[in-house]
Image: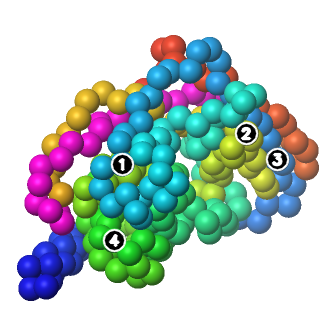
């Protein structure tokens, strides 16, 4: 008991409380009386790449209740009709519009059966991310990128919150040996962001009329290597996948007053553009 208690204490002490620089916003909230709507889809074109799944080699009673023995990395989800889920579609360089109204479900992370849910998070700059673990096993949420927290969850149903002070991309990983656990978070300055559903559909509402550049951003799906780390619970050296960089596709769109415009993205494994810094 003393040994396990010492390990638990060590895990709790991993909490990092860094104070990142606060991003400056150039976005102005205005009343939009004649806003338009952008609807559309993101579809996959061409053969699907083969993405490896990982063996569930730790805590199978919690992580693998259906005894599947392997876990998909969830980096590329394509429906039967080609719709690509978890693609972020947003307007670039928009300077004014409606108030922030990002979905609350994208600002709450749960850890359930050794998965991060949802896989893609959207949090306003200077907004709060809520985090919880539903699993009765040690997890961590190790953030890197525009946030650098490392949060242990030694108990089930523990909820914490952290403010996201810097705009940009945040990678989320588990340092407790569940090497397949991964998620991504975008910390953003304006509300004109949407995440595609399981069929690749998206919608942006109450957009001020005008011409814009719209982007479809994907986290990247290729496994490019393995990175070594120590399981904070067992102190054993483990390997977890390293993923390819995010990719993007852009189009021009004209939003009519009180009208709707449709935008269709076709993405593929061929020559995607490297995503610029969000």
- The residue at the far right in this view is 258
Q: Nearer the viewer, mark 1 or mark 2?
A: 1
Nearer to us in this view, 222 or 52: 52
Q: Do the residues labelled 4 and 2 touch (CB within 8 Å)?
A: no
Q: Which mark is residue 56?
A: 1
**Magenta includes 251?**
yes
Q: Which mark is residue 37?
A: 3
Q: How far apart are marks 1 and 2 (CA)?
A: 28 Å
Q: Are marks 1 and 4 in contact (CB under 8 Å)?
A: no
The residue where tag 4 is placed is 137
- Closer to the N terminus: mark 4 or mark 3? 3
Question: Residue 210 at what x, y percent from top left?
Answer: 76, 40
Determine crowd level at label 4: few under 14, some 14-19, many 20+ residues with C-alpha closer than 10 A: some
Q: Which mark is residue 199?
A: 2
Q: How far apart are marks 4 and 3 (CA)?
A: 44 Å
Question: Residue 102 at what x, y percent from top left?
Answer: 63, 62
- Closer to the N terminus: mark 4 or mark 2? 4
Could you tell me if residue 125 is visible in this image? no
The quadrant holding residue 15 is bottom left
- Closer to the N terminus: mark 2 or mark 3? 3
Question: Left of 124 or right of it: where is 176?
Answer: left
**Magenta includes 221?**
no
Q: Nearer the viewer, mark 3 or mark 1?
A: 1
| Above or below: residue 80 compared with residue 111 | above
Question: Left of 76 or right of it: where is 209?
Answer: right
- Closer to the N terminus: mark 3 or mark 1? 3
The residues colored magenta run 232-252
Which residue: 38% across, 66% down? 165
- Closer to the N terminus: mark 1 or mark 4? 1
């Amino acid at each position: 008991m003393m040994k396990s208690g010492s390990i638990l204490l060590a895990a709790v002490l991993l909490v990092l409380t860094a104070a990142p620089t606060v991003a400056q916003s150039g976005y102005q909230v205005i009343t939009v009386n004649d806003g338009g709507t952008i609807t559309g889809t993101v579809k996959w074109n061409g053969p699907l790449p083969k993405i490896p799944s990982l063996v569930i080699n730790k805590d199978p009673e919690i992580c693998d209740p259906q005894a599947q023995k392997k876990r998909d990395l969830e980096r590329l989800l394509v429906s039967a009709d080609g719709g690509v889920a978890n693609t972020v579609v947003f307007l670039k360089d928009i300077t004014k519009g409606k108030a922030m109204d990002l979905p609350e479900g994208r600002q709450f992370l749960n850890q359930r059966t050794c998965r991060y849910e949802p896989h893609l998070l959207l949090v306003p700059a200077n907004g709060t991310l809520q985090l919880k673990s539903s699993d009765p096993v040690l997890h961590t949420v190790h953030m890197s990128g525009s946030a650098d927290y490392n949060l242990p969850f030694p108990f089930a149903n523990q909820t914490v919150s952290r403010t996201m002070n810097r705009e940009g991309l945040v990678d989320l990983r588990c340092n407790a040996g569940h090497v397949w656990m991964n998620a991504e978070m975008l910390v953003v300055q304006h509300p004109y962001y949407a995440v595609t559903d399981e069929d690749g559909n998206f919608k942006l509402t109450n957009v001020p009329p005008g011409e814009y550049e719209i982007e479809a951003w994907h986290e990247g799906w290729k496994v490019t290597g393995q990175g070594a780390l120590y399981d904070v619970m067992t102190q054993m050296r483990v390997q977890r996948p390293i993923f390819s960089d995010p990719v993007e596709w852009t189009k021009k769109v004209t939003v009519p007053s009180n009208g709707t415009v449709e935008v269709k993205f076709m993405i593929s494994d061929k020559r995607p553009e490297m995503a610029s810094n969000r």
